[in-house]
Image (cartoon, grey):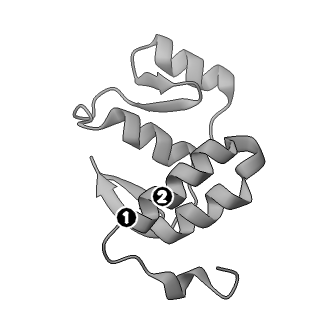
Amino acid sequence: MGPTRKTLYAMRDAGILEQLARGTYRLKDLPPLGNPDLVIVAKRVPQGIAVHELDGVPVRIYSAEKTLADCFKFRHKLGMDVVLEALWLWRERRGRDVESMGPTF
């Protein structure tokens, strides 16, 4: 489970931890991050396909086809304008993998 909220706040107040974002902390003694925003997003959204490393933090990144499928899956939350733009951008890509989309596309 990890440390309690009270422990995290005490460690932050003592200068042991730094708070990167709500619910995301790191040791203050570590070297600065070169891509702090990407690291924060990667820690909050842990699902993915390909794993890359940024500033020593494993980051999982979806393929373009998986991202497009998710856009359609969450079209009511994202809006059709976003979905259609994603589809247009995917169609313009070189090396797109139509076969990985499965029989529904």
Q: Quadrant of residue 77?
A: top right
Visible in this render: residue 1? no
Amino acid under disc 2: Trp
Which residue is nearer to you in this view: 19 or 3?
A: 19
Is residue 103 toward the left or the right of residue 30 in the image? right
**Mark 2 and 1 residues: CB-CB less than 8 Å, in contact?**
yes
Q: Which mark is residue 92?
A: 1
| Residue found at the far right of this picture | 76
Q: Which mark is residue 88?
A: 2
Callout 2 crowding tier (Cα within 10 Å): few <14, some 14–19, many ≥20: few
Is residue 73 toward the left or the right of residue 21 in the image? right
Count of numbered badges drawn on the protein: 2
Q: Is residue 68 above or below residue 101?
A: above
Q: Is residue 73 above or below residue 80?
A: below
Measuring 63% from the left and 56% from the top, which residue is drawn there?
A: 71
x and y percentages locating residue 38 in the rendered image: 39, 41
Which residue is nearer to you in this view: 92 or 26?
A: 92
Distance CA(mark 2)–CA(mark 1): 6 Å
Label 2 residue SS: helix
Q: Please state, as top left, top right, bottom left or bottom right, where the C terminus lies in the image.
A: bottom right
x and y percentages locating residue 60 in the rendered image: 45, 60
Which residue is nearer to you in this view: 22 or 62?
A: 62
Amino acid under disc 1: Glu
Measuring 41% from the left and 22% from the top, which residue is drawn there?
A: 18
Visible in this render: residue 28? yes
Label 1 residue SS: helix
Is residue 8 toward the left or the right of residue 60 in the image? right
Measuring 39% from the left and 34% from the top, which residue is drawn there?
A: 37
Q: Is residue 9 above or below residue 55?
A: above
Q: Which mark is residue 16?
A: none
Measuring 39% from the left and 15% from the top, which residue is drawn there?
A: 15
